Amino acid sequence: MRFIFKTSYQQDIQLARHGGHVFWYGLLLWGLVTAPWWLQEYWLTQLIFVMIYSIMGLGLMLLAGFTGLFSIGNAAFMGVGAYVAAVLSAHGTPFPLTLALAAGLSALVGAVVGLPALRVKGIFLGIATLSFGFIVEEGLARWESVTGGNAGIHVKAMVLGSWKVDSAASFYAVCLGVTVLSTLFVLNVLRSSTGRAFVAIRDSEVSAQSMGIHLAYYKTLSFMLSAALAGVGGALYAHKMQFISPEQFGILQSIDLLLMVVIGGLGSVHGAFLGALFLITLPQFITLGKDYLPAVIGQAPGLQSLVYGLVLIAFVMFEPMGLYGRWLKIRTWFELFPFYRKGMFKRQKSFQKSDRLK
Amino acid sequence: MSDILLSAHELSVRFGGVLAVNKVSFEVQQGEVFTLIGPNGAGKTTVFNLISRLYTPTSGHLTYQGRALNDMPAHSVAAAGIARTFQNIELFEHASVLQNLLIGRHVHRHTGFWQQMLFLPSVRAEEILTRRKVEEVIDFLDLQHYRDTMVAGLPYGIRKVVELARALCTEPQLLLLDEPSSGLNMEETADMAFWIQDIQKDLGITVLMVEHDMSLVSKVSDRVLAMNQGEVLAVGTAAQVQSHPAVIEAYLGGTLDVSAFKRETMGAA
């Protein structure tokens, strides 16, 4: 068991809480940086998808996991980012600028969608964002002069001056850089007053307000950040797929994103990554498992959706804290061995919360 | 002592057909402990919610340090120097005690979003200062033991103290305590009384509270205001208010009722 003996306030602020963190995250980063040298191209591509989805997951995690606002329309922001990338790269815009504009435009759209969030909550907000998702998908399909409509649009490779990002390894490097930066930004926001304001809004709006937190400002900010990250992810996604069409940014994509953060573990940054890892690797396992299943089940259409659904139900019922929550339990088991008790993570039910002011 | 910090003038609020607060006027002086008492449904908490701008008065004025509170948005009240606790505890459940207190320092932040996103040295310095200030409150209320505990796992009595601590973290001039001793045992109530006195004397914070425990009220309050059904019954020291006939009537029923009851039983016998 590790006891951290704190001797300065600095220790509370640092990202790496102790030597173990430095070592393991350092090792992870080193492994990721060197991946193009030891990983097959197929797996490198999978890793790229994991990173792209992680970025979008981080965005939704900020919104749903930390601010408590559920969005079933985040694929729309992703679509905005993707189309910005497609249109700009056709003009040969350098990719840092493309990414920045994709993030910026998505954030603006996010601010607009954030407006109903100031009035409606919970399931109603879900419905509002869901319908917004449909509007954007429809808009992308109809605005043919720019988006190419339902026929889709080809996306050119990223360029920066004379450097053209067309190999898997170079694209991987760009993705890794963007992922690391996004993660750092999110962690920085979360460890300062903005992140704490998000958490405050999630847990009690009434008392957040009386602590001086401007609800409208922080809710809008949360939506904008979430949309910006989805936009960045969408831009990378567009470059990776090289071809995009409106139906890639529909409700199914939105549900995938939401599924990802719920399975990963709401309210943890790790959860976004674990969720993305899960979302990308599960289809591989299903494909592997197909051959061993009887043909009636193995070859049936919709097997993947069924498995996703079952997994989601299982998580909500047995592990509401998601993959990260499970990991915390396993870690605690090892740390406390042999003193781990079954009920350690049981939540105490409380019936004191007042609903009078809501 | 004679400076008026907060004054309410003819304050009324109506919810549909219910007149929850009816022409209530009072003045809270700088540095005093001012207590609102009254039976359930008297409108005490409603007055609190009016001051913290969760409700808007139907008529009347609230003036705080010479500024009109009426048109101030709810999130500006904390920055103006008014902090509050809630009757049923409104802590941030899924955060640690420390995080809750850090949120209490929200009004004292000076860095903007972009600086925070890049975690510039100014943000780092501010975070360390925030942490130090929070530690002072932790020391003041003896919360060291619970610093890193999740609020969701804390017993009720400790939550009450954490909520008080969070309000103190905003460094208020006026502290609104909504039933600070409800749900506390004798010992915890005694601690609460000491803290309220310390808050008044050592920190120089004016306290406005709603309280039912009369021993606590008479121990710490400089002045007491009794309310019933949205109206002011009496204002004065705890002893004066307790012996006021209208207050006794509100709590125990009128003497007329009692005599009527007597006559009836006599007649029956």
Image: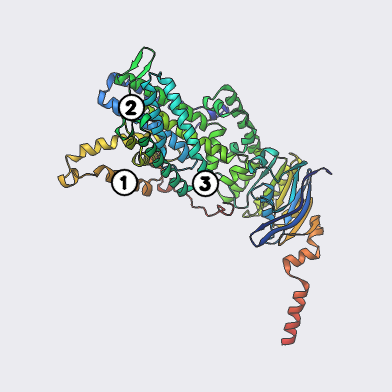
For the N terminus of chain A, give its image quadrant.
Answer: top left
The residue at the point 39 percent across, 23 percent down is A88
On the image, the x and y values in percent for residue A36 come to 30, 20
On the image, the x and y values in percent for residue A235 come to 38, 27
Q: Which mark is residue A48?
A: 2
Q: Secondary structure at mark 2?
A: helix
- Amino acid type, label 1: Gly
Name the residue carrying label 1.
A309
On the image, the x and y values in percent for residue B212 come to 69, 57
Q: Residues within 10 Å of mark 2 (few under 14, many from 20)?
A: many
The residue at the point 34 percent across, 35 percent down is A246
Q: Is residue B54 left or right of residue A51?
A: right
Q: Which mark is residue B152?
A: 3
Let me know if marks 1 and 3 both belong to one chain: no
Dot in front, 1 or 3: 1
The residue at the point 39 percent across, 33 percent down is A78
Chain to which the residue tagged by mark 3 belongs = B
Distance Cα–Cα, label 1 vs label 3 = 30 Å
Q: Residues within 10 Å of mark 1 (few under 14, many from 20)?
A: few
Q: Secondary structure at mark 3?
A: helix
A110 is higher (above) or lower (below) than A48: below
